[in-house]
Image: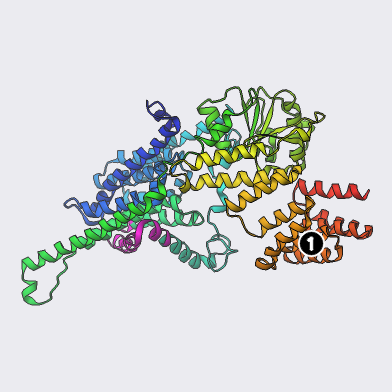
């Protein structure tokens, strides 16, 4: 809602302007943190001259740290979260120093408002309540009640979530129009696995709550992770400052110490499995305690000589602190310079071309009036569709919605008024098969009315056996072929789309800085295996080998999994001799791997050596007893050897190991052969 105002600025794209929002609040956070540090030092040490060095250098170390610098350049919640954290603490300190309730009420309002940006500010509540009762001596009940009401005014920003969700936007995170969806979104359940994640280093199975006897171990583990993170991103100076500054704060002002300690303790524990940008509240406390340490260090009356003459010499007394200040300042300047130089290349995003070039080209290449089922690019495609309005004639659909436990809750007629949606009452959603039938029903009806294009998506193809119903269409796109509308496979050029995609990659790689863009290569490393998976499932083995070679040469995927895919390809394509050549490096470099035993069995099976093939499949099962495929392949080996009884008994075991619909389809194909 705040970023919306930035979109009216007359410069750059909307994406640029929303990124600019993060940058502005990053800068405001740094300014406010400097003011807060000086106010904090006044509370701890009392009024005095401005402590510029002590307040400035922790701020600079934070500014040029990789997590803060990186998130100052992207459309994310973290710089605004850091700004609100500084603002709340600043207002509480102003309330203490000036004894003006308006600052307390302002802190309550912004505390409520900040919850609409990052819900984990809820963890500040024990710290704020502790500080309130420690500092408020008069009308506690009245001021607590007024502060709570003002907090609710700010907190009411959450009402925007269900209101906006009712409009069925493309990106409707958590579907918060329902109470369950609202609660899921507000409590951030989608990232629950990273919260309080396996705190005990000594006992990975335990967490902070089930076994309080491990609380000491967990506390040490959290402290270790926090200090490691501070050392990595904010230099060892911040680690020293954090620890010694905490002791100095405890000695000078205990309510303030416990207030900050509670903020750090819960933040560091909750995000121990995430760290980095999620540790910004802890970073801010570390900056404050480091400013206390630096102030104490720079103001200490050190002397270089304990003789009576030296102690009586005012010149000596003044010279040593001055020398110390110069030395400390040089060390800090060096740390800041090192931070800036070391992290610049890591945070430089001037080469982020992926959404603006490659994915934009894909969106522009879509057929007129088509339905586009987007997978890995859904977020970028939603930007091009809903924000930039590149293709208003195209209806954008998320592939992941079909994998939901109840797709109709996400695919409503209000959201897709121009699509033909299957009737939910005609489907059951108690299994993945139910979702698959719903998806195919959707594809069948809509593909007869409009071109239905599906983005290359290895996960989608693995979950849903769709390959035989998809036709290569160009670049990253596959077209759904309605049942009954056959196509001449001989007239197709299945590798044409992959060739076009490779040309795009070559053009992308010519752009400066793209080689250092990790997200770019992550997207590419998703698409290329998807091409290979599709070609394999559709029986285009020559094209699959081409994709596999790109995975090998360009992505560097040279492990046993890659070799197994190549052996599979060659055996299915009737090239057993070449398959055996690919098997030899596996047996040499990965002798006892699951993939090696499985590949060995596949080669032996293709050569008609069924007895040895069965032994290889058994060895694969010794490595992974829950795997489905060795049972399936073993059933085929028994079938090849003429033992129908063993074939059937092995298939019965294989059925119990099925994990995906593709597994089920393969098993049913074998059963048809037996029949």
Q: Is residue 430 visible?
A: no
Dominant SS type (magenta): helix
Q: Is residue 290 magenta?
A: no
Q: Nearer the viewer, residue 657 or 615?
A: 615
Q: Quadrant of the N terminus?
A: top left
Residue at the image point whose x is 57% and y is 44% from the top: 524
Residue at the image point whose x is 33% and y is 59% from the top: 238
Q: Is residue 216 above or below residue 307?
A: above
Residue 506 coordinates in the image, percent (x, y): 53, 41
Residue hosting label 1: 601
Q: Is residue 239 magenta?
A: yes
Total count of labels: 1
Q: Is residue 484 above or below residue 128?
A: above
Q: Nearer the viewer, residue 238 or 351?
A: 351
Q: Nearer the viewer, residue 96 or 85?
A: 85
Pointer 1: residues within 10 angstroms few (<14), some, or many (20+)? many
Q: Is residue 286 above or below residue 224?
A: above
The magenta stretch spans which residues?
228-256
Horizontal arrangement in the rendering, residue 538 relative to residue 202 (left or right): right
Residue 465 coordinates in the image, percent (x, y): 76, 42
Q: Is residue 589 above or below residue 443?
A: below
Residue at the image point whose x is 37% and y is 28% from the top: 11
Q: Is residue 581 visible?
A: yes
The answer to which image quadrant residue 502 occupies is top right
Local SS, label 1 = helix
Horizontal arrangement in the rendering, residue 374 relative to residue 564 (left or right): left
């Amino acid at each position: 809602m705040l970023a919306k105002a930035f979109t009216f600025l007359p410069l750059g794209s909307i994406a640029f302007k929303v990124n600019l929002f993060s940058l502005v609040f990053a800068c405001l956070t740094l300014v406010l943190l400097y003011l807060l540090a000086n106010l904090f030092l006044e509370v701890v040490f009392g009024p005095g001259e401005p402590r510029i060095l002590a307040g400035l250098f922790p701020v600079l170390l934070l500014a040029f740290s990789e997590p803060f610098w990186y998130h100052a350049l992207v459309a994310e919640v973290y710089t605004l979260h850091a700004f609100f954290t500084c603002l709340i603490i600043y207002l509480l300190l102003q309330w203490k120093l000036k004894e003006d309730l308006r600052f307390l009420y302002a802190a309550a309002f912004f505390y409520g408002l900040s919850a609409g940006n990052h819900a984990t500010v809820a963890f500040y509540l024990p710290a704020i309540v502790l500080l309130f009762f420690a500092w408020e001596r008069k009308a506690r009940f009245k001021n607590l009640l007024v502060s709570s009401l003002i907090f609710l005014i700010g907190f009411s920003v959450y009402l925007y979530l269900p209101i906006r969700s009712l409009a069925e936007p493309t990106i409707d995170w958590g579907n918060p129009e329902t109470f369950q969806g609202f609660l899921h979104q507000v409590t951030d359940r989608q990232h629950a696995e990273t919260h309080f994640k396996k705190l005990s280093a000594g006992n990975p199975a335990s967490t902070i709550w089930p076994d309080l006897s491990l609380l000491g171990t967990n506390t040490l583990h959290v402290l270790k992770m926090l200090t490691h993170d501070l050392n990595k991103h904010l230099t060892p100076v911040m680690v020293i400052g954090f620890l010694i500054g905490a002791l100095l704060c405890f000695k000078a002002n205990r309510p303030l110490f416990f207030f900050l300690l509670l903020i750090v303790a819960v933040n560091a524990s909750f995000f121990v499995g995430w760290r980095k940008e999620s540790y910004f509240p802890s970073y801010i406390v570390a900056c404050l305690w480091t400013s206390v340490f630096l102030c104490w260090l720079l103001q200490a009356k050190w002397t270089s000589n304990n003789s009576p003459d030296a102690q009586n010499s005012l010149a000596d007394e003044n010279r040593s602190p001055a020398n110390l200040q110069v030395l400390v300042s040089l060390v800090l300047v060096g740390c800041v310079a090192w931070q800036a130089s070391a992290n610049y290349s890591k945070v430089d995003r001037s080469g982020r071309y992926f959404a603006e070039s490659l994915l934009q080209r894909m969106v522009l290449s879509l057929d007129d009036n088509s339905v586009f089922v987007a997978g890995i690019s859904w977020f970028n495609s939603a930007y091009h569709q809903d924000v930039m309005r590149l293709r208003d004639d195209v209806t954008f659909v998320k592939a992941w919605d079909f994998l939901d436990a109840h797709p109709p809750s996400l695919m409503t007629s209000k959201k897709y008024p121009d699509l033909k949606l299957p009737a939910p009452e005609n489907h059951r959603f108690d299994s993945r098969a139910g979702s698959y039938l719903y998806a195919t029903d959707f594809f069948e009806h809509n593909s007869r009315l409009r071109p239905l294009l599906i983005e290359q998506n290895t996960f989608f193809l693995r979950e849903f056996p769709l390959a035989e119903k998809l036709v290569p269409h160009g670049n990253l796109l596959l077209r759904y072929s309605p049942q009954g509308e056959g196509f001449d496979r001989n007239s197709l050029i299945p590798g044409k789309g992959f060739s076009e995609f490779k040309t795009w990659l070559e053009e992308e790689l010519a752009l400066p800085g793209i080689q250092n863009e990790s997200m770019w290569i992550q997207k590419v490393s998703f698409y290329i295996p998807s091409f290979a998976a599709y070609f394999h499932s559709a029986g285009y083995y020559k094209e699959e080998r081409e994709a596999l070679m790109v995975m090998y040469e360009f992505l560097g995927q040279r492990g046993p999994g890659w070799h197994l895919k190549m052996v599979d390809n060659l055996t299915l394509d009737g090239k057993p001799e070449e398959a055996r050549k690919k098997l030899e490096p596996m047996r040499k470099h990965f002798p006892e791997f699951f993939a090696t035993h499985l590949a060995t069995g596949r080669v032996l099976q293709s050569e008609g050596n069924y007895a040895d093939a069965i032994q290889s499949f058994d060895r694969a099962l010794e490595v992974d007893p829950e795997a489905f495929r060795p049972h399936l392949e073993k059933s085929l080996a028994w079938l090849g050897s003429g033992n129908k009884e063993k074939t059937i008994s092995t298939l019965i075991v294989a059925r119990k190991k099925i994990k995906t619909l593709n597994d089920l389809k393969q098993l049913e194909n074998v059963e048809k052969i037996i029949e």
